[in-house]
Image: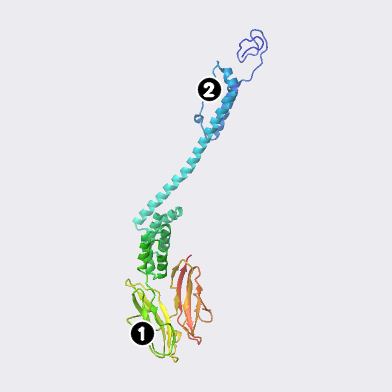
Amino acid sequence: MKCPKCGTDLPDSSQLCTKCGSEVSQNFNYSNMENELLNTVLEEEAINGMSEKSMLYQQQEPDDDDYEEEFYGKESKKQPGRLAAALLTSAAVFAGAVFFLRTFPTEITYKKIESEYQNCLKLMSQKDYEEAAKYVERLLDEDAENLEYLALKNTICEKTGSSKSQMKVLKKIIAADADNYAAYEQLLQLYLAKDNLNEIKKMSEDAPNAAIAAMLKAYLVDAPYLELTPGVYDTIQELVITSEGGHEIYYTLDGSSPKENGTLYTGPILLEQDHFYTVKAVCKNSRGSYGDESFGEYQIGINAVRPTPAEIEQPAVYPDAGEYSTPQMINIDVPIGYQAYYSWSLGTELTPQNGTLFVGGISMPEGDSTLSVIVTDGNGNSSPVKQVAYSYQP
């Protein structure tokens, strides 16, 4: 610094001029200010997890020759630039930290899933399907629509004989992959095993392409047609039964099941005078699958005596027992002049006194349920109870 009186150059620490003896005032040390400012920035960066090496600039000592220019002429421009660089560096490091925090858990999750997948395959190869099922459930918790995981569960269900669970899995596979021909084939076989033609028919109607529709329709069987309109006739009649698909027809005349007790139809059936007939007929295709039953009652002659309901094996209930995913109305074939009663309770024997009178379609309740049905003539005679199990899962 210089003496303000005589201009003599003096050390920064001088308090008196060595030449004129005047008192020298201490000026503000800008170099110290810069050092303190830079140290403050470094401390803030260290708190935020940054090191001194991450700075985009290094602290520099000013040259003695351009000291005045450095801190008087450029100070207003230099300091904001350095601060801006520090802030940009902080932002870059913060972004990197966020990326790391997001990526690190993802890698852990991937390794965990891969480990569970390999464990599942290993257990399946050892035929330990019960333990393998636990791992595949964890995989599906991570990705419920993953076709590979669903295929593993389908195989486990098949190996363990869990047909109900397998049906649900196959439906999920079809929902995720509508053109999965193999899934339709497997689901078809499960429905055939349960004789659930209603679901096969529904699948055929909703088939995504012609190949799957043709495969399903090959297993569908039409209901036979009773050419003679059911009702009361004065004289002997002939009953003709036809099949649109040219399938074999089996029939009964006493209301019993044509699948179990049916006679092969070979030509017109003579309905004799003064008889009452409860006709049931069903078609059977070359694969051994049955279609829906047809039903009709015929009273031939005014003196025909109807058999009591006890002589009829069981009342007919539609649709058949099985699993359904759409709303269904249940109907009962009630003989002319008789009444039907039903109940959803299993613990009590069904009678006209504790049952509900059937007057029309019954809504199928959601979940698993069993419908009990009887037919009565009003004189104390009732048919055997027919029970039909339904599972409605919307």
Other residues around mark 2 within 10 Å, as few (<14) / some (14–19) / many (≥20): few
Q: Residue at x 49, y 42 (%)?
A: 101
User: Going from the N terminus, do you reach mark 2 or mark 1 first?
Assistant: 2
Q: Which amino acid lies under the numbered mark 2 shown in the image of this protein?
A: Gln
Say which quadrant the N terminus sits in. top right
| Circle 1 Cα neighbour tier, 10 Å, few/some/many (<14 / 14–19 / ≥20) | few
Residue 269 numbered tag:
1
Q: Label for residue 123?
A: none
Find disc 2 in the rendering and name its residue: 60
**Vertical position of residue 207 compared to residue 386: above or below:** above
Q: Is residue 201 visible?
A: yes
Nearest the camera: 227 or 43? 227
**Quadrant housing residue 316:** bottom left
Q: Is residue 196 visible?
A: no
Q: Secondary structure at mark 2?
A: loop
Is 222 positioned to the left or the right of 344 in the image? left
Q: Secondary structure at mark 1?
A: strand
Amino acid carrying label 1: it is: Ile
- The residue under the point 40% across, 49% down is 114
Horizontal and vertical percent for residue 30? 60, 21
Residue 323 picture location, percent across and down: 44, 68
Q: Position of residue 57 (x, y in %)?
A: 51, 27
Farthest-out residue, top? 19
As displayed, is residue 234 above or below residue 25?
below
In-front residue for pair 247/15: 247
